[in-house]
Image (cartoon, rainbow, N blue to C red):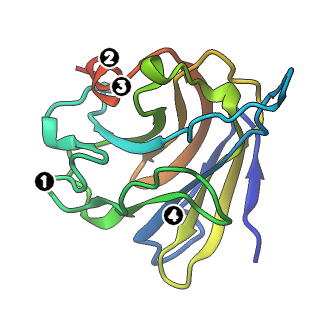
Amino acid sequence: MAGINLVKGQKIDLTKGNAGLAKVIVGLGWDPAEPARGFFGVKKQANVDCDASALLLSEEGKLIKKTNLVCFHNKQSACNSVVHSGDNLTGEGDGDDEQINVNLAAIPSDVHKVLVVVNIYDAVNRKQDFGMIKSAYIRIMNAAGNNELIRFNLSENYTGFTALICGELYRNNGEWKFSAIGEGSHATHINELAERYI
C-alpha cells in the first residue's frame, strides 16, 4: 500500500487515526545524478556519501544534549528511542539508503521534535553538493509491517547546498505529526548543522 505523497510545507497527522502506531521507520533514499560528459567522454565523479541524521529537539527547537544528535558517529539516542541503521557510502541500489528507527512512545517528554537531515560527507574537499544527487526522498513507515504511511519527494534543485533539512516528526496536542520541510543548507558537517540548534 502506497503512502500519502506530501508537498513542501505540508503537515500531516501520524498517530491520530492510526491507533496503536508507536514505532516508525524513517527511510531516506537518493541516487547519484548522471556524471557530466566532458570533452573526452563521461567524467568519472567520486561517490557522493550522504549521511542521514536525526536531531531530538526541545519545544523551543533546541538540542539540549549531545546524545540527542543521532548520526553515523552516534547511532542511538541516550533514551534508545531513536536508532540509526548505519552508513551507506554510495546511495546506489533501490530502496532506502539509510533508515532511522523511531519509537514515538519512548521519546522523552522534553523532546518535542525529531528533525531529520541529510548532509554530504566531506563535501568541501570533494567539491560535492546536492546538485549531484537525484530522486531524493524521505518516507515514514509503520515499523509493524513496513507499510509506507507518508512520502515526500525532495524534487527541487538543491545545487550548491551541502545539507538538506528533510522533515520533522513533532508533537501536537498529545499526537505526533510530520512536516515536509525540504530546505537546503550550506552546513558542511552534521556538527555544524547541529550547532544551529544549541
The three-letter amino acid code for the residue at tag 2 is Arg
The residue sitting at 39% across, 54% down in the picture is 87
Label drawn at residue 78: 1
Outermost front residue: 40
User: Residue tagged by mark 2?
Assistant: 196
Q: Residue at x 69, y 26 (%)?
A: 131
Q: Is residue 135 left or right of residue 174?
A: right
Residue underneath mark 3: 189
Most foreground residue, 101 or 43: 43
Q: Earlier in the sequence, mark 3 or mark 2?
A: 3
Marks 1 and 2, how far apart at CA? 21 Å
- Tell me whether circle 3 and circle 4 mark residues in contact (CB < 8 Å): no
Judge left or right: residue 44 versus residue 189. right
- Name the residue beneath numbered marker 4: 15
Q: Please name the residue shown 44% across and 45% down the image.
A: 52
Quadrant (top left/top right/bottom left/bottom right) for the C terminus? top left
